[in-house]
Image (cartoon, helix red, strand yellow):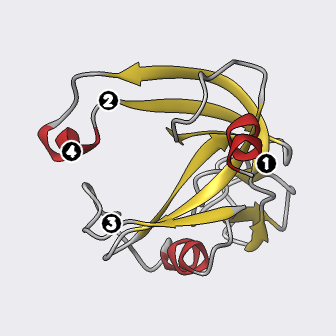
Amino acid sequence: MRSVRVDRPAPYPPRISAATRPFWDALGDERLTTTRCLDCGDTTFPPKPICPNCFSTQLSWQSLSGRGTLYSYSRVWAGPEVFGEELPYTVCVVDLDDGLRLGSRLLDGVEPEMGKRVTLVFVHYTDATLFFFESEAAMKNES
C-alpha cells in the first residue's frame, strides 16, 4: 500500500468521537481497522461502539488488509462545492478480501473495471488522513 500527501486541508474532514478515535488514529498510522464483536464474531465497517448484530458492547479492534475487488463505481462530474477542486472524481464500492464491503473514493490512473483488484491508498491531508483505493493495474503502470 502506498501513501499520498496533499498540501491542503481535507475538503470535508472527519468528525472524530471517542468511539471512532482509534480508527482515525490507526488511519493516520497507515493502518485500516474496524471493530469486531467478541460475543458473536461479527465484523462491521464503519467501526461501531455497539455490535449491530447482537447489540454487545464487547468489541475489539481488527486490522483489515486494504485489498479487494472493485464491486461498483460512479464518476462524479458535479458535486458539492467543498469538493470543487477535486472534480471530477470517482466513488467506488469495494469488496475487501476480509469479507466486508465498503465505499470510498477511487484514484484515477486507469479506466476502472468492475471485478478488478484494488488496493488501499492512505491520503494524508494537512488536517486528516483519509483512505482511497486505486487499481492494482494503475500501481503496476507507475512501477
Number of numbered discs overlaid on the protein picture = 4
Q: Is residue 120 placed above or below 115 in the rendered structure?
A: below
Give how far across and how far down residue 63 sits, in percent.
78, 68
| Mark 2 or mark 3, whichever is nearer to me | 2
SS for callout 2:
loop
Q: Is residue 28 above or below residue 9?
A: below
Question: Depth-wise, is mark 2 or mark 1 nearer the camera?
Answer: 2
**Kind of residue at disc 1:** Arg
Q: Amino acid at mark 3?
A: Arg
Q: Which mark is residue 12?
A: none
Whole-Å distance between the Cαs marked 2 and 3? Answer: 24 Å
Report the residue that reaches farthest toward the left: 81
Q: Spatial distance from mark 4 to mark 3, Cα to Cα? A: 21 Å
Which comes before the other along the chain, label 2 or label 3?
3
- Regarding mark 4 in the picture, which secondary structure is present there? helix
C-alpha distance separating marks 2 and 4 = 9 Å
* Sequence order check, earlier mark of 1 and 3: 3
Write down the residue under mark 3: 15
Which residue is drawn at the image coordinates 75% and 52% (left, top)? 143
Say which quarter of the image contains residue 77.
top left
Residue nearest the viewer, comparing 59 with 17: 17
Residue under label 2, please give it.
Answer: 88
Q: Which mark lies nearer to you, 4 or 3?
A: 4
Nearer the N terminus, badge 4 or badge 3? Answer: 3
Category of crowding for the residue at label 4, using alpha-carbon neighbours closer than 10 angstroms: few (below 14), some (14–19), many (at least 20)? few
Query: Which residue is rendered at x = 77% and y = 44% of the image?
Result: 140
Residue tagged 4? 85
Q: What kind of element bears circle 3? A: loop
